């Protein structure tokens, strides 16, 4: 059995697709591309697809991950192209690697998010960010199936900062850009929870809903505060395997006795 790990996006209007919507679209793409999928056992077999930490409905993403199991080997790049052609524009398969290490989900410990706040002045956003980052705790509320839940959103936010106004905005229209790194903890802290926290500590309330995009997710490096590429170990393992035969082919042949 071969395992392939894929990175895909949710762009434009497709950010409003739910995780279940994507599952249905992806399984149709597998059939169209004639991928030799492995199936589960039982009365209702289903393709062996492992989804990891999907973004909330309504948010865009440049870094969603999943893993599929095949019954016959396929070239990862060829498979990526076939699946990408079979999905609607906006749900784009942008990377594929053969799984040569274990624990993809264990390497998704943090996300980098960008929040676009139309109608918010940069100075107001900077004051709100300063209030949030210096606060010892930021309690927010979220409605769950069991009622309203209150929790502290501050510990999960590893960094929060403002960025310059986007180039595609008219100069007379304010727009603040926030960039944040959020650890994947329990309970999960989502970008809308951070926005609730900014409203609680600094009364920052954008006049229109924020445009939220996940830029990356992976293993959080505590020393540098960065999020690393979760597929890098698989690429490195593949490169190491290809380097061994190449080195053997170029090694000098020992001379025998005269």
Image: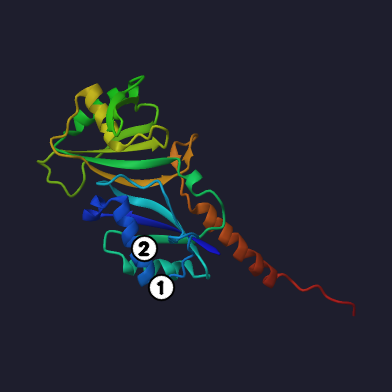
How far apart, in angstroms, are the residues tagged by discs 2 and 1? 11 Å
Mark 1: few/some/many CA within 10 Å (<14, 14-19, 20+): few
Could you tell which of marks 2 and 1 lies nearer the N-terminus? 2
Residue 165 at x, y percent in the picture: 21, 41
Q: Quadrant of the C terminus?
A: bottom right
**Disc assigned to residue 104:** none
Say which residue label 1 marks.
Answer: 34
Total numbered badges shown on the rendered structure: 2
Q: Is residue 129 visible?
A: no
User: In the depicted view, which residue is nearer to us: 170 or 61?
Assistant: 61
Q: Is residue 88 left or right of residue 81?
A: left
Q: Which picture quadrant has residue 86? A: bottom left
Residue for point 46% across, 59% down: 48
Q: Quadrant of the N terminus?
A: bottom right
Q: Is residue 236 left or right of residue 163?
A: right
Q: Is residue 174 above or below residue 44?
A: above
Q: Are marks 2 and 1 in contact (CB under 8 Å)?
A: no
User: In the depicted view, which residue is nearer to us: 122 or 76?
Assistant: 76
Residue located farthest toward the right when viewing the structure as drawn: 258
Residue for point 43% across, 55% down: 66
Label 1: state its secondary structure: loop
Residue located farthest toward the bottom when viewing the structure as drawn: 258
Residue 7 at x, y percent in the picture: 40, 56
Residue for point 49% across, 34% down: 222
**How is the protein colored in the picture?**
rainbow
Q: Is residue 228 above or below residue 255?
A: above
Residue 6 at x, y percent in the picture: 43, 58
Say which residue label 2 marks.
Answer: 27
Residue located farthest toward the top when viewing the structure as drawn: 136
Q: Is residue 96 above or below residue 189?
A: below
């Amino acid at each position: 059995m071969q395992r392939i790990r894929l990175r895909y996006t949710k762009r434009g209007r497709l950010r409003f697709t739910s995780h279940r919507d994507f599952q249905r679209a992806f399984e149709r793409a597998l059939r169209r591309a004639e991928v030799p999928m492995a199936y589960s056992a039982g009365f209702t077999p289903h393709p062996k697809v492992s989804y990891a930490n999907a973004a909330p409905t309504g948010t865009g993403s440049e870094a969603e991950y999943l893993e599929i199991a095949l019954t016959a080997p396929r070239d990862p790049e060829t498979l990526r192209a076939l699946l990408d052609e079979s999905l609607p524009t906006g749900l784009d398969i942008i990377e594929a690697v053969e799984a040569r290490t274990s624990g993809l989900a264990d390497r998704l410990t943090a996300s980098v998010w960008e929040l676009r706040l139309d109608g918010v002045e940069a100075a107001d956003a900077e004051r709100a960010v300063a209030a949030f980052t210096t606060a010892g705790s930021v309690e927010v509320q979220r409605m769950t199936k069991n009622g309203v839940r209150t929790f502290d959103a501050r510990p999960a936010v590893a960094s929060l900062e403002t960025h310059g106004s986007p180039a595609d905005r008219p100069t007379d229209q304010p727009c603040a850009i926030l960039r944040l790194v959020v650890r994947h903890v329990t309970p999960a802290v989502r970008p809308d929870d951070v926005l609730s926290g900014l409203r609680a500590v600094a009364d920052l309330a954008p006049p229109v809903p924020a445009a939220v995009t996940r830029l990356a997710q992976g293993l959080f490096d505590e020393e540098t505060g960065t999020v690393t590429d979760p597929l890098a170990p698989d690429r490195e393992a593949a490169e190491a395997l290809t380097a061994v035969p190449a080195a053997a082919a170029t090694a000098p042949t020992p001379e025998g006795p005269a």
